Image (cartoon, rainbow, N blue to C red):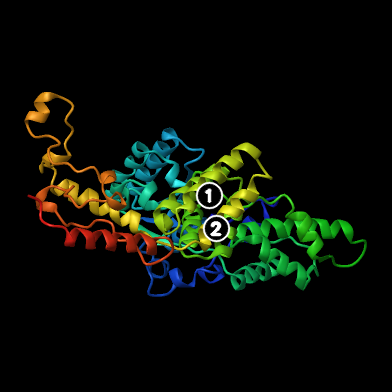
């Protein structure tokens, strides 16, 4: 079992202290419970093909190694970032040779979502005939990034970012681990531990990498006696940290979704927070503004028509000013959109209108509102009987504009909020005038 975990003396701390027993995996109690899929596989050695989906540093590689170890399978690892068809073929050939002698192979594919459709297809026959047990690791939603045929042959296990308690347990285990290679008597003060947890972002590998760098700083500063890692050491070790933000992955769209939903939910502070997260991650401000423009129409609409104009003004401002000055108009727009009255009547009206249009696409345009550019059109009755609203009081005259079978159908229903309260009052007034008008002759 230990051969799967042996590392070189100069391997990173995260590798030197990689868990070798399920009990040493922190922060994934739910997926490792005795009755869970993974818990049962680790206990019985019966391992199905799996996809481990979760953020970096949550234990995907460690769990794959543990599954191979506890089930007495040969462990092969590939990275979809650096491996190609030749590498896959070589691993499959070795697995087939083992199968001849009754040995099983667990093939771990890191970043499996980076393999294209044809490369993913290539695993299918070897999963089906038992040549390999495939364990893929991905940070992307498998429902979007993996082909359906592969998903149907695997079980998806979702891993969560480590919480603060789990991260502190990772630190304690590393400090006490016999293979860590840390100085005897090394201490991490309370503020330093808090700083490590804060900088980790739920990532065990991240916290161990920063700890290792902070230890080196503490050792270089200590003239005699055991070193103590301070919060300053952690800050220096982590100063090059970039906000975790993958502009091509699910995380980007999760943040955009959180931003949009916060605006819709009238939570100004949350909307500002998610916008700042994206800006800190280097997101193009125009991506953020596009979501604001869409939200202004979808979720505010005619409750406050100024919202769309303000969102578009923010677009113009960021293009004109650039960053960082152009971020202030973004904040102004975010606050306006979040605090504006909300109505989805425009969204619902569009859906209702398109549905009705599909259902009644053959209904003719009423003659009196047809175009009559020629004598023939006029002779056919086009435009006959049309009444020009501006020739009447209040620029309104009751007449039918929908096809006769649809007369009276209502597609737009304003909400009793913001400017739409006045819109509803006008609609009710026009409805009253229609009801009081004499029938057309």
Q: Is residue 286 depicted above or below 434 in this figure? A: above
Residue occupied by mark 1: 310
Residue 141: percent from left, percent from top: 41, 53
Please state if 57 lies on the left or on the right of 49 as rendered.
right
Query: Which of marks 2 and 1 precedes in the sequence?
Result: 1
Q: CA distance from mark 1 to mark 2?
A: 8 Å
Dot 1: what SS? helix
**Mark 1 packing: few (<14 Cα in 10 Å), some, or many (20+)?**
many
Residue 277 appears in which quarter of the rendering? bottom right
Q: Nearer the viewer, residue 154 or 384?
A: 384
Q: Nearer the viewer, residue 363 or 188?
A: 363
* Residue at 76% over, 60% down: 234
Q: Extreme right residue here?
A: 223
Q: Are marks 1 and 2 in contact (CB under 8 Å)?
A: yes
Q: Which residue is mark 2?
A: 336
Q: How many marks?
A: 2
Residue 11 in view: yes
Q: Nearer the viewer, residue 255 or 79?
A: 255
Residue at image location 41% in from the left, 55% down from the top: 301
Residue pictured at 59% horizontal, 50% vertical: 330
Q: Is residue 244 visible?
A: no
- Nearer to us in this view, 355 or 131: 355
């Amino acid at each position: 079992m230990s051969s799967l975990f042996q590392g070189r003396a100069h391997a990173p701390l995260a590798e030197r202290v990689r868990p070798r027993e399920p009990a040493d995996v922190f922060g994934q109690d739910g997926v490792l419970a005795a009755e869970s899929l993974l818990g049962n596989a680790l206990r019985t050695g019966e391992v199905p093909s799996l996809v481990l989906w979760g953020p970096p540093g949550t234990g995907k590689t460690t769990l794959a190694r543990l599954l191979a170890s506890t089930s007495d399978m040969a462990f092969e690892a590939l990275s979809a970032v650096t491996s190609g068809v030749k590498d896959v073929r070589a691993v499959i050939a070795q697995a087939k040779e083992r199968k001849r002698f009754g040995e099983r192979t667990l093939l771990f594919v890191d970043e499996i979502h980076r393999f294209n459709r044809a490369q993913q297809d290539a695993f299918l026959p070897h999963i089906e005939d038992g040549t390999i047990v495939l364990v893929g690791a991905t940070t992307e939603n498998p429902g979007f990034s993996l082909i359906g045929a592969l998903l149907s042959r695997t079980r998806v296990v979702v891993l969560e970012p480590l919480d603060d308690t789990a991260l502190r347990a990772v630190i304690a285990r590393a400090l006490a681990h016999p293979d860590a290679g840390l100085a005897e008597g090394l201490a991490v003060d309370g503020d330093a531990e808090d700083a490590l947890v804060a900088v980790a972002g739920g990532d065990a590998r991240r916290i161990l990498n920063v700890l290792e760098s902070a230890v080196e700083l503490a050792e270089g500063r200590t003239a005699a006696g055991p070193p103590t890692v301070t919060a300053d050491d952690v800050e220096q070790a982590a100063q090059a940290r970039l906000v975790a933000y993958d502009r091509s992955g699910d995380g980007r769209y999760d943040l955009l979704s959180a931003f949009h939903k916060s605006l819709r939910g009238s939570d100004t502070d949350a909307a500002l927070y998610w916008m700042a997260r994206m800006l800190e991650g280097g997101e193009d401000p125009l991506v953020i503004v596009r979501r604001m423009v869409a939200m202004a129409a979808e979720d505010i609409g005619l409750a406050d028509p100024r919202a769309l104009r303000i969102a578009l003004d923010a677009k113009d401002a960021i293009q004109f000013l650039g960053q960082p000055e152009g971020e202030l108009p973004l904040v102004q727009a975010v606050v306006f959109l979040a605090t504006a009255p909300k109505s989805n009547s425009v969204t619902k009206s569009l859906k209702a209108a398109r549905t009705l249009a599909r259902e009644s696409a053959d209904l003719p345009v009423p003659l009196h509102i047809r175009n009559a550019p020629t004598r023939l059109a006029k002779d056919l009755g086009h435009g006959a009987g049309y009444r020009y609203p501006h020739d009447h009081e209040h620029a309104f005259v009751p007449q039918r504009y929908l096809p006769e079978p649809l007369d009276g159908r209502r597609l737009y229903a304003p909400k009793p909020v913001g400017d739409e309260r006045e819109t509803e009052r006008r609609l009710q007034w026009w409805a009253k005038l229609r009801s009081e008008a004499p029938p057309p002759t």
